[in-house]
Amino acid sequence: MTRLVCPFCGARELVEFEFHQTLPEPQAGAYARVYERVDHGQDSIEHWQHLGGCRAWLRVRRNPWTGDVRAVALEGSGT
Amino acid sequence: MAATGRYSAWSLIRARLSRGGYWRPLWSGRCLQPGYDVVVVGAGGHGLATAYHLARDHGIKRVAVLEQRLVGYGNVGRNTTIVRSNYLLPENHYFYEDSLRRWETLSRDLNYNVMYSPRGVVDLALSDADMANLARRGNAMRLAGIDAELLDRNAVARLVPALELQRARRFPIVGALVQRRGGTVRHDAVAWGFARAASALGVDIIEHCAVTGVRAAGGSATGMETTRGFVKAERIVFATAGHTGMIGAMLGVALPIETHLLQAMVTEPIKPLLDTVIVYVYPGHGETYICQSDRGGLVMGGHLDGFPSYTREGRWDRLEEVVQGAVDLLPRIGALKLLRQWAGTNDMTMDGSPIMDRLRYDNVFVNAGWCYGGFKAIPASGAAFATFVATGTAPDLIKAYRISRFASGHLLDERGAGPFPVRL
């Protein structure tokens, strides 16, 4: 994983992006949201920001076990 | 003892005279037995040290260490070999001080030279605030009987003549905190030394044996499914820091751990230049820690890559940042080539301190969440965790590392950064 494809700017180097957090499971309670990480080997949904580019907040679907990036979408775009 | 007997000057002479055939493997190649009193998962530093102390201190005869790959393939061979006990919080500095004292005598205890080198760990200060912060940490250490010394700029220049202090910097180096008993240990020798000593006490070390599941009845685990079949176990120890998230997935437990990559790199070997460990955290950019190996290579590391990953690929901009820091401190190394770069996976807990506790079943123990501090913790962790596993009661030294601290609010937040696994 050396690049991410920003929906606005296209493929850019990883240095331009900042990882923010792995989104918790929708039903998770307060403790789980703050402290627990579910590590199930499948894709996780993460918030990233294109900090060194258009500064858009992104919703990235990625597998941390393999490093594969499945999808990058604009946060709030509903995709 | 498995093969070569006790190492000594005499054994060296005998080996020289016996024309080959004298040196034997460091640990026996006994294969997996159907059942054990304790099965340790992970033949890294912590797993091997725990097995060694279970056999030596608690007389537990049937112990096995299972390893998915090779002895020392994981983080025990991927760190930057630094040992120190310069922590602020009492729970941490007493624990790491216990570890540092054990490093001092480990070569003798194991009869294996781990090359402990107390060359001093120097944390550089770039501002008055840094100095105040380091003074506070140093004072906390000294109150606990741990050596710490605050240096001004001139003293830093005398201690580390190779450092470039004259160049105009936005954040000039104004001083440092040094722990002189801190230093480096040859990390591969630690894995091999513990494996050899454990094997000599009858511990089975099983390489290329991956655990695929835990079998349980009621509230207790009965054994483990492995790639070499089922193995019965009275007690199970997971010492797989870096991959504890995967163990959580196997047991169906969500852990307060995020898995991140940490890179290290080494230059081509040069003549002696640096006889201390330098830690350089520069505002707005990053971090570089650097020391010179006995072979002459400059070993460097820095921040985490910054996002969850198990891939063991490092990101290039981080590598660049670490090298920039090193060249800034030691401009004369700018022409050197990097020989190798690698990454290890780190269990990052939500407060930066480890977890040593039971997990899910009353006879399953997990030694995890070492963040960046795993290597230096090995001797203390092995001894204390073995006591925990053997007696069922956690010794005082590791009581604070229970997993329930996150829910009860008794966090050990060394950085004062709040409940985040990473702060860049």
Image: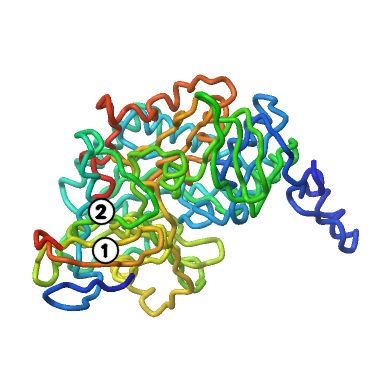
The x, y position of residue B153, in whole percent, is 25, 53
Residue B329 showing in the rendered view: no
Please, what is the three-letter code of the amino acid marked with disc 1? Answer: Leu
Residue displayed at 71% across by 42% down: B204
Above or below for B79 versus A1: above
The x, y position of residue A18, in whole percent, is 20, 62
Question: Would residue B149 be found to the left or right of residue A22 on screen?
Answer: right
Q: Considering only order in the chain, which callout, 2 or 1, is on the residue closer to the N terminus? A: 2
- Residue B38 - label: none
Residue B364 showing in the rendered view: yes
Please, what is the three-letter code of the amino acid marked with disc 2? Answer: Arg
- Residue B165 - label: 1
Q: Relative to the observer, which residue lies in front, B219 or B418?
A: B219
State the colouring used for the structure image. Answer: rainbow
**What residue did someone put label 2 on?**
B153
Q: Chain of mark 2?
A: B
